[in-house]
Image (tube, rainbow, N blue to C red):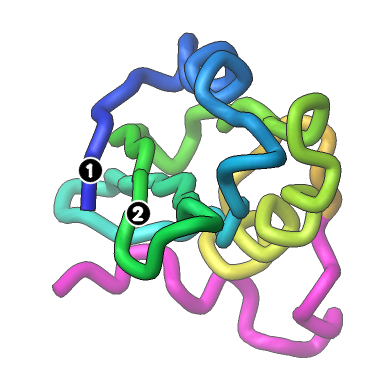
């Protein structure tokens, strides 16, 4: 797996430059709770022609930071973005809360769940 560290202010542009829909399959956006009220956000892609070529862009941020959207480049990313909002209680540009969790569910169940 190739890991590319980015910052929130450049991640959308870096993914736009990288992404070619004919070569890369967008898998998901993942969140990993870190210590100290921090979160690692991961944007994960796999190459179509190979079995094991994975590229992951990742950025560390605070839960209060606004995470940029990649929907302009990859429209289907809206589902992963909304899942991140529900599971971690973060703000992702243009992504509403309430995709997976009902109003009476435990809100942001994965926030602060560091290993």
For residue 28, side relative to residue 73 (left or right): left
Query: Residue at (70%, 39%) from the top-left corner?
Result: 21
* Relative image position of residue 5 (x, y in whole percent): 25, 28
Does the segment drawn in magenta span residue 71?
no
Query: Residue at (35%, 54%) from the top-left corner?
Result: 54
* Relative image position of residue 61 (x, y in whole percent): 35, 33
* Relative image position of residue 103 (x, y in whole percent): 85, 80
Does the segment drawn in magenta span residue 102?
yes
**Who is closer to the viewer here, 53 or 102?**
53
For residue 100, side relative to residue 56 (left or right): right
Question: Which of the 4 image quadrants contains residue 2?
Answer: top left
Considering the whole magenta stretch, tell me its main secondary structure: loop
Q: Name the residue furthest front.
A: 49
**Who is closer to the viewer here, 34 or 37?**
34
Q: Which residues are magenta?
A: 97-115
Residue carrying label 2: 54
Residue carrying label 1: 2
Query: Residue at (41%, 46%) from the top-left corner?
Result: 41
Residues at marks 1 and 2 touching, judged by CB atoms closer than 8 Å: yes
For residue 50, side relative to residue 32 (left or right): right
Q: Is residue 82 above or below residue 60?
A: below
């Amino acid at each position: 797996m190739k890991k590319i560290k980015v910052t929130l202010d450049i991640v959308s542009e870096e993914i736009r430059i990288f992404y070619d829909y004919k070569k890369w399959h967008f898998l998901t956006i993942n969140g990993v709770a870190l210590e100290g009220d921090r979160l690692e956000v991961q944007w994960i892609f796999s190459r179509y022609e190979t079995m094991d070529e994975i590229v992951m862009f990742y950025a560390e941020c605070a839960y209060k930071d606004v995470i940029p959207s990649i929907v302009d480049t990859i429209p289907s990313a809206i589902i992963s973005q909304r899942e991140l909002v529900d599971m971690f209680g973060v703000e992702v540009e243009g992504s509403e809360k309430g995709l997976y969790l009902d109003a009476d569910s435990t809100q942001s169940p994965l926030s602060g769940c560091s290993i």
